[in-house]
Amino acid sequence: ALEDTCTLVNGKDNVFEKALLTLVLLSYIQAFVDGNKRTARITSNAILIANGYCPISFRTVDSIDYKKAMLIFYEQNNIAAFKKIFIEQFLFAVKTYF
């Protein structure tokens, strides 16, 4: 599953698409015993930073909304709700920190 995730992510040219897919897919596949979502956020931010973009903190997202968006992705294979959160948080980070 991790190999498939890497192949999918590395096949994308758009940095934001790579970062978003990394975030949701690493969380989804539960590659580690603990810290999957934290690891996914760190890895996603590493992709953004390595490509000259600012990281995302997700500080202003309601934890229930975050979990709901993840569950929609997990259960319905629909990334739209999480993509909206990702975009909003990136714009917040740019406006607030940079």
Image: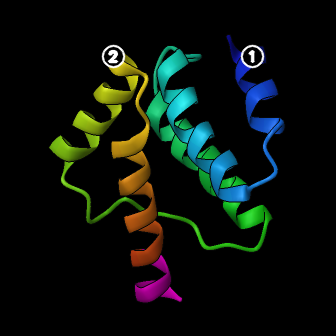
Dominant secondary-structure state across the stretch colored magenta: helix
Identify the amino acid type marked 1.
Asp
Q: Position of residue 54 (x, y in %)?
A: 61, 73
Question: Looking at the image, is mark 1 or mark 2 earlier in the sequence?
Answer: 1
Quarter of the picture holding the N terminus: top right
What segment is highlighted magenta in the picture?
Answer: 93-98
Q: Position of residue 44 (x, y in %)?
A: 61, 49
> Around disc 2, counting alpha carbons within 10 Å, would you say few (fewer than 14), some (14 to 19), or many (20 or more)?
few
| Alpha-carbon span between mark 1 and mark 2 | 19 Å
- Answer with the quarter of the image where residue 84 lies: bottom left
Q: Position of residue 65 (x, y in %)?
A: 20, 45
Q: Is residue 94 magenta?
A: yes
Comparing 36 with 84, the one in front is 84
For image coordinates 46% across by 21% down, the residue present is 34
Where does label 2 land, which residue? 75
- Answer with the quarter of the image where residue 72 lies: top left
* Total numbered labels placed on residues in the image: 2
Where does label 1 land, which residue? 4
**Secondary structure at numbered mark 2:** helix
